Image (spheres, rainbow, N blue to C red):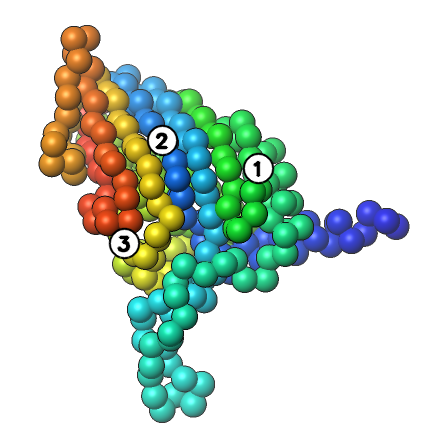
Amino acid sequence: MHHVPRILAVIALPLLLAACIFQPGKFTASLDINADRSFVFSYLGEIHAVDMEKLQGGDMPMTEADGDAKKPTSEPADGEAKGMSEADKAALAETLAKEAGFRKVEYRGDDIWFVDYRMAGTLTHSFVFPYNQDAGIIFPFIAIEPRANGTVRMKAPAFARTSGQPGMAGMPVGDISNNSRIEGDFTLSTDAEILSQSNEDGAQTGTDGRKTIRWKITPQTDIAPMAVLRMKN
């Protein structure tokens, strides 16, 4: 019977996660995409959880219960994960550590998890990080989408100031542009043809012909890393 509290906590965790959204903190990330559709993505650094209610209230007008007035909330959007105890947050680290790609997950307090993630594969289908279906809300740090015309589109929406991004089923998650904790480097490397990309400095080509694009991410970054690549097949 001493296992019952732990079992109940595991059952309740998805409900608590549904009230939160995850954002990057200090990190280093890289993505290698080859023209043959093979890829490797890695993320080393912080992930922190933010209360959904505070995100929705950050700069968005909220309707009072009687429907007679609207007023913006005074609460900051960068709030702590509501409803999650320290035990819940440690349990989340254990849950993520069991998923493919997570080589290390450690809860370090103050709603911050340290993550060492690496995933390799072939882009026969879309890839999103992070993703946990129990959380109920999807706001990807990065998404890679193969298209029927032989191209692959990569975008990292969480690595920039973003307002009104949709969550699951198009549900708005409010203004998340004040992620003051974000600080990182994101590098894209490819031997495929680059059709378009969002870095004004462009791509650097090495002696081996491989092209590299580097984005420096800060709280002031307002253009998300993006690239469209043409595959060989």
Q: Which mark is residue 162?
A: 3
Q: Which image quarter holds the C terminus?
A: top left
- Which quadrant of the figure has residue 96? top right
Residue furthest to the right in view is 1
Give the SS element for disc 1. strand
**Which tag, 3 or 2, sits closer to the chain's start?**
2
Q: Quadrant of residue 146?
A: top left
Whether residue 226 appears in this view of the structure is yes
Q: Amino acid at mark 1?
A: Glu
Looking at the rendered image, the disc whose residue lies closer to the viewer, 3 or 1, is: 1
Could you tell whether 59 is left or right of 117 in the image?
left
For the point 54% across and 62% down, which residue is it?
82
**Circle 2 crowding by C-alpha within 10 Å: few under 14, some 14–19, many from 20:** some
Where residue 207 appears, x then y in whole percent? Answer: 16, 8
Q: CA distance from mark 3 to mark 2?
A: 19 Å
- Residue drawn 19% across and 8% down? 208
Mark 1, other Cα within 10 Å: few <14 / some 14–19 / many ≥20 = some
Give the structural element (helix, strand or loop) at label 2. strand
Q: Amino acid at mark 2?
A: Ala
Residue 90 falls in image quadrant = top right
Mark 3 or mark 1: which comes first in sequence?
Answer: 1
Which amino acid does the dot numbered 3 rest on?
Thr
Q: Residue furthest top?
A: 208
- The residue depicted at 40 percent of the width and 28 percent of the height is 42
In the rendered image, which residue does mark 1 sit on?
106
Disc with the residue nearer the chain's start (2 vs 1) = 2
Residue at image coords 52%, 58%: 81
Q: For marks 2 and 1, give the CA distance.
A: 18 Å
Name the residue tied to disc 2.
29
Residue 68 shown left or right of residue 101 in the figure: left
Where disc 3 sits, the SS reads loop
